[in-house]
Amino acid sequence: MPTPIDPQVIAAIRGAHDILCISHVKPDGDAVGSLLGTGWLLRRLGKDPTLALQDGVPDEHQVLPGAADILSAVQPAYARDVVERAFDLVICLDASSPDRMGTAYNPARHRTAPLLVIDHHITNTRFGDLNWVAPTCAATCQMVAYLADALGVALTGELAECLLTGLVTDTLCFRTSNTDAEVLETAMRLMRGGANLAAITQQTVNRRPFSLIKLWSLILPTIHLEEGVIWATAEQTLFDLAGYPMNDISLSSFLVTADEADMSAVLVEKADEISGAPVVECSFRAKPGFDVAQLAFAFGGGGHPPASGCTLPGTLAEVEPQVIPALQAARRAQAAARATAQRAAGQPLLEAGSPDAEDQDADKQDANGGVI
């Protein structure tokens, strides 16, 4: 197990009955999988969990067992059964900062219950009353598997299917640099428990709608490559032309596969959901040996070293000149530090696009504020 589970976490779960489980806005596979998995885990312990997501479950995850029971903001019962209801415990999964919980967490009503944060993002701000943060885990679903072990719950049936979904989506089907033996061992146990890897992969990472492919064709003419950074930009009008909703466009992982690039960015201008003012959602990717998490964190977002994001106020014309030079400067500094370390170790220098530069994190909605 990468990190021990605080006994207080176990005690909080065992001591609660009415439990609200939530995850981040614009949920990805790990958010939905860990949320549903925790729900199945709690039911096996005799608890009464309520599962909620501000933005609801994406289409590709609607087939997961229990997905239909997740409450979202568009449902009439959401205010009564989530926002205005008191609970014994609130569990927040896969979110690195409090703003990512959205309206599913109501401080005025829910603050009387302890907030337990379970997350694997290195940029997590430890905003809960109890925080179990394990950046060495490839997915929050991996953490929930360890939680099930600690609580004596078998990794079988619906629980296994939901947790393997999060592992598959957050590792791009076990191809990211944080896919270690622990990840594969966890996946093996979930498969032995009945989860179908082939079916999950086909339902998630191996499918995309035609409207998304059409959107890519509209965005790709905007790409630039300078100083080891490749990036593209998009405005709302392109989404309208393609008929694709304003959510994950799954492009930054594709861009970073360019041989000449070490980092990628996709900048999407949209209107803020509350004020209507222009904002730009930024998605970053990095090849092994490079880190985009700290830059995202500096801009108010977060994520992982190979995959992160943020949202900045302003138009593309205002944000692009801020973000791209900062990304290029970070890449230069990291490349220099990497070269120094390689020389000190007597290793050959690895250029951008070397065979060691493998694909990065899953095409997903980052849990920290960017369309990625």
Image (cartoon, helix red, strand yellow):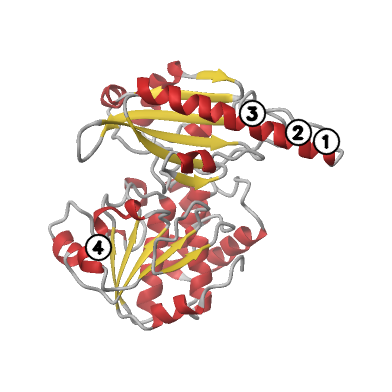
Asked if the residues shown at circle 1 and circle 2 are in contact, with their CB atoms under 8 angstroms apart, the answer is: yes
Residue 39: give x, y in percent of width and height.
36, 69
Residue 93 locus on image (x, y percent): 40, 61
The kind of secondary structure element at disc 4 is helix
Q: Are marks 2 and 4 in contact (CB under 8 Å)?
A: no
Q: Could you say whether the residue bearing mark 1 is in a helix, strand or loop? A: helix
Front residue of 141 and 19:
19
Q: Secondary structure at mark 2?
A: helix
Separation (CA) of disc 3 from disc 2:
11 Å
Asked whether the beta carbons under mark 3 and mark 2 sit within 8 Å of each other, the answer is no
Around disc 4, counting alpha carbons within 10 Å, would you say few (fewer than 14), some (14 to 19), or many (20 or more)?
few
Instruction: Say which of 228 and 298 sits in front.
Output: 298
> Which residue type does callout 1 highlight?
Arg
Q: Which mark is residue 11?
A: none
**Mark 3 — residue?**
332
Query: Is residue 110 shown above or below 137?
Result: below
Looking at marks 2 and 4 on the same chain, the residue that comes earlier in the sequence is marked by 4
Q: Give the spatial CA distance, label 3 vs label 1.
A: 16 Å
Q: Amino acid at mark 2?
A: Ala
Q: Are marks 4 and 1 in contact (CB under 8 Å)?
A: no
